[in-house]
Amino acid sequence: MKKTILIAIVFVTMLLGTSGQSGAASLVANIDVSSQTMTVRYGLSVYRWSVSTARPGYFTPRGSYKPQRTARMWYSRKYHMSPMPYSVFFHGGYAIHGTGAVRQLGRPASHGCVRLHTANAAAFYAMVREVGFGNTRIVVTN
């Protein structure tokens, strides 16, 4: 019986791509500003989504970050109470969030945040909440 349980634990751990200590799958979001894409690695799954980052005159910060906070729905006080559904804040007021401006995805259009289709933002938000901030890494590169 104990051997069966141990085998099951090892199998689940391998399936989720975790170490035995962490207890949760890892989540890495790579945002490539030059291609306006976000590649998400969640356990064994890989997703690639179009995004919009900073348009000319604005800046999306580069670097490696951990999420700082999440908000199911946030309204930007800085930009006329614009809705930011499924926000994952990663650097001060910069967040990955959903947008209704889906025609702009794939090209720079934001004030600096990383915009996603709202369905993809909801999926990413759920993944972050599932694995936790400590097991999530957000990497923004040129």
Image (cartoon, rainbow, N blue to C red):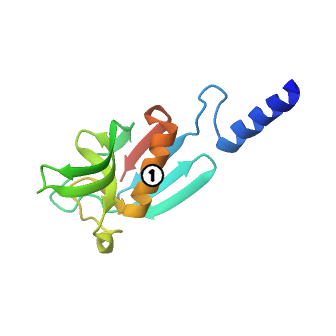
In depth, the one of 73 and 137 nearer the eye is 73
The residue beneath circle 1 is: 124
Query: Residue lying farthest bottom?
Result: 103
What type is the residue that disc 1 sits on? Phe
Residue 14 point in image, percent of width and height? 72, 39
Residue 118 point in image, percent of width and height? 37, 62
Left or right: where 34 falls relative to 45: left
In depth, the one of 52 and 14 nearer the eye is 14
User: Which residue is depicted at the point 65% across and 31% down?
Assistant: 19
User: Which residue is depicted at the point 50% across and 52% down?
Assistant: 40
Q: Quadrant of residue 98?
A: bottom left
Left or right: where 94 falls relative to 128: left
102 to 80, vertically: above or below: below
| Disc 1 crowd, CA 10 A, few/some/many (<14, 14-19, 20+) | many
User: Which residue is depicted at the point 81% across and 30% down?
Assistant: 5
Task: Count numbered badges in the picture.
Answer: 1
2 to 115, vertically: above or below: above
Indicate the secondary structure of the residue bearing disc 1: helix
Left or right: where 129 falls relative to 62: right
User: Which residue is depicted at the point 20% across and 52% down?
Assistant: 75
Q: In the rendered view of the protein, which quadrant contains the N terminus?
A: top right
